[in-house]
Amino acid sequence: MGICPHFFYILLSYDDLKTDKLRKGWGFRVGTWNVDSLTGRAGELVEALADREVDVGCIQEMRWRGSGCKFFGAQGKRYKLLRMGGQDRSDGVGMFVAEKWVDNVVKVERHSERVLILKMVLDNSLMNVLTAYAPQLGKREEEKENFWNELFHLVSCLPQNEMVVLAGDMNGHVGSNSVGYDGTHGGYEFGDRNADGSMILEFADGLNLVICNALFMKQESKLVTYLAG
């Protein structure tokens, strides 16, 4: 069986990328993981988040039914999980919010088992963190187009004076070629773009978002997030 790379992306609004807070290394960390089922793994994941000092950890494919919230972790290193699943044990997205930020959450929007939005107050600003799980290889093109159209609508409806961070498993590969997407793609990526990667770039470009993963050079061993074979 061949090797199939999985790519996870974090997208940030272009105007936010230019702000003084972000250029000076504003201390807020967002991470994203496809956990391939959260059952029996929540404690281990929370430990990893705490060790890496992640403030909000976005997760995909948790495979839990329904919606809910719950604290996990040891005292002083706790995270609150806000989640949204489907009717069966497939897909599902969520966010682990570090306990110190829980009171800063002002709104949670559970749109589907593929999209969840968290609105937070940071200093004097509002920030929207979105976690998304795009339809994977083998899904119908109609389902993929519906997903990206819905996500585009959700992001475009957010107030322009609020920060936007989108983190998730986009199930596409943008490749190393940034021609035509200079404001969106920083040029530091891997391999050739596929059709789903083109959808990611068109989505980001249309909303003035920047793909953060492509803004800096990475070690060769870290160019591919996940290998399945």
Image (spheres, rainbow, N blue to C red):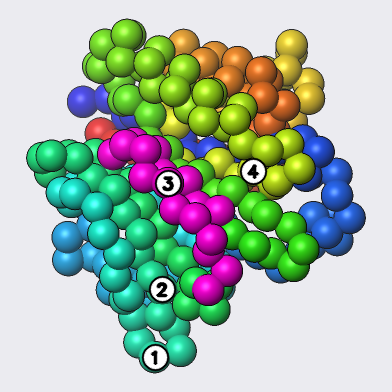
Camera-side residue: 185 or 17? 17
Q: Is residue 222 above or below residue 14?
A: below
Give residue 118's mark. Answer: none
Q: Does 183 sit left or right of 209 as displayed?
A: right
Read off the residue under disc 3: 109
Q: Residue at x 64, y 43 (%)?
A: 164
What number is the disc on residue 79? Answer: 2
Instruction: Give the x, y percent position of residue 48.
Output: 42, 70
Which numbered disc, 4 or 3, marks the residue that appears first in the sequence? 3
The residues bearing labels 4 and 3 have C-alpha atoms spaced at a distance of 14 Å
Magenta part mainly helix, strand or loop? strand
Let me know if residue 106 is in the magenta part.
Answer: yes
The residue tagged with tag 4: helix, strand or loop? strand
Percent of width and height locating residue 214? 67, 35
- Regarding residue 45, the answer to whether it shows in the image is yes
Q: Which residues are magenta?
A: 103-119
Q: Nearer the viewer, residue 46 or 98?
A: 98
Reading the image, the residue beneath label 4 is 164
Kindly state the secondary structure of the residue where label 2 is placed: strand
Residue 145 pos. (x, y %): 40, 13
Alpha carbon distance from label 2 to label 4: 21 Å
